[in-house]
Image (spheres, coloured by chain):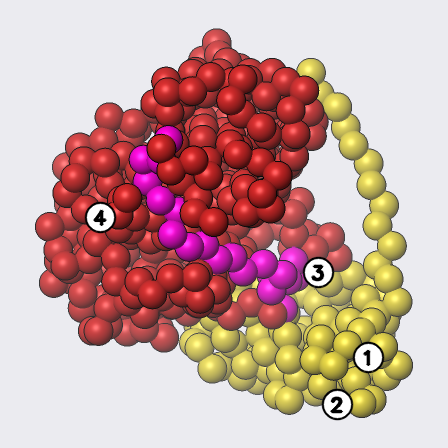
Amino acid sequence: MSIESFYEYPAGVALSRFLEGLRLGRLIASKCSACNHMIIPPRAYCLKCYRPIKEYQIIGEEGRIVTYTRSLINIEGKPANPPVTWVFVKFEGVDGGLLHVLDSTINPQIGMRVRPVFREQRIGSILDIKWFTAV
Amino acid sequence: MDIWIAGVGEIPCKPSYDGMDFREMLYNAAVKAYFDAGITPADVDGVVSSGMDFYEGVSITDSYTPDQVGGRLKFNTLVSNDALNAFIHGCMLLKTGHFRTILVTAYARASNILNYPEIVLNSFDPYVIRPLTPHLYTVAALDARAFLINSGCEVRDLSLVVVKNKRNALRNPSAAFAENTSVEEVESTEVVSEPLRRGHVAVPCDYAAVILLTTEKGLGKVRVEAFGYAVGSHSLDFSLKAWGQSRWARAAIDMAFKQTRRRRFDFLEISEPFAHSELMVLDALGLVRESVCKTLRDGGFNIDGHLPVNPSGGCIGMGYPLNAAGLQRLVQSVNLLRTGRWESCLVASPDGEVVDGGAAVMLSVEV
């Protein structure tokens, strides 16, 4: 027996800012006006002092690889052909970070400086970033 | 108020219990626990079920549990995440003084899940992670890479963990994946996501366990000396994840240390969905003087080492029963303590393969 389930989640105030930023080809973080803590993806409340967030800022695109892997399987557990390189990227002065894929021609290293490459056609999705590539 | 384990029951891990449903599996485990404790369902005041609806795909677990474990019309509640949380919930219920005996259950029907990686994907952030469709091994591999770099360990150390646990499992009749294997054999398995090989991954299994907790010293077999937990730090978009670290383990053991003076244990049981999971927890716990990798290579974590880790075989040797892993570790610990070889142990279990959360329980036989 198969039962299909359909859900539609509102992204919320903060994440909607982030997704709109992606549509415009920018990275948006939240900034706490009380303690200046910044985080990406943005939150509607400060994780440090719990105050409501009123400020969202475009951040610099350049980040650094914190960890990486070359994955030989896809989500179905079947061989990924070609293999996909995954990275987690953190940005200077900003807490949090982004999981994404890396340009397959790049040989990753921890600490490597990278930047996102945006697609020409963007819809307000994490997939608006085609991949990260070396700076 | 002291809490005791009065009895334990389990059915052995198997890749699949064909023809048996989860209620029948739990019934068989419960009958063994009642026999072990020397009590009947009439003596039980309440039931705490560990359950993850995502994994089960049936309904809310506590609605399906009481009948088969003798808990009909008794206090009944469900605790999510790893089963150690349900166990700790049971301990806290007893500490209220309103209960005398609590039954804790957990089971896994991994063989029911036809698309496990996609099920796990659905537990991640729907906007930032799910569209990218990472396999859970991919996320685990990011952790493994960061751990190896930060700790100075090598991929070979992951294989050493596998060899140790699979060999330990040869002594355990409940283990499904016991094997006298070698580092070379583990490293001949396919790479799934660098640096992880197929052999570094604990294979999901079917399993059921029941533990009877009591405040009655006369019924007690093993004492629950302390417990701790660390939840709420996990971010579903991984933005706050400390890659390569099990910070939850340090927080959980620090909470437990406030309840006991004990700082040394005769052995550890750690749920390890991946080989590096065991090393990450050990690194966070800080119970050995030298580096985790050096201690591993020197045999310090072997069953005859100075701090045996997963003498039961762990999840790699026994099979990984999803959220039931914590109760699997506890049942093995109770059985090992009752052999008379050891007097105390620490049990630690994460709330999932790639989750920054988990719990720890300290047991002893100092009656």
Residue under label 1: A51
At label 2, counting other C-alpha atoms closer than 10 Å, the crowd grade (few under 14, some 14-19, many 20 or more) is few
Q: Is residue A12 visible?
A: yes
**The label number, if any, that marks residue B128 in the structure image:** 3
Q: Amino acid at mark 2?
A: Cys
In whole angstroms, how far apart are the C-alphas of marks 4 and 1?
A: 49 Å
Q: Quadrant of residue B5?
A: top left
In whole angstroms, how far apart are the C-alphas of marks 3 and 1?
A: 23 Å
In whole angstroms, how far apart are the C-alphas of marks 4 and 3?
A: 47 Å
Q: Chain of mark 1?
A: A
Q: Position of residue B228 (x, y in %)?
A: 48, 57
User: In the picture, which chain is red?
Assistant: B
Residue lying at 34% horizontally and 23% vertically, measured from the top left: B36
**Viewer-closest of B91 and B173:** B91
Please, what secondary structure does the residue beneath circle 4 have? Answer: loop
Q: Amino acid at mark 1?
A: Arg
**The label number, if any, that marks residue B343 in the structure image:** 4
Q: Amino acid at mark 3?
A: Val
User: Could you tell whether B242 is left or right of B72 in the image?
Assistant: left
User: In the picture, which chain is yellow?
Assistant: A
- Give, as a single range, the part of the protein colored magenta: B219-239
User: Could you tell whether B360 is left or right of B167 in the image?
Assistant: right
Q: Amino acid at mark 4?
A: Glu
Q: Is residue B237 magenta?
A: yes
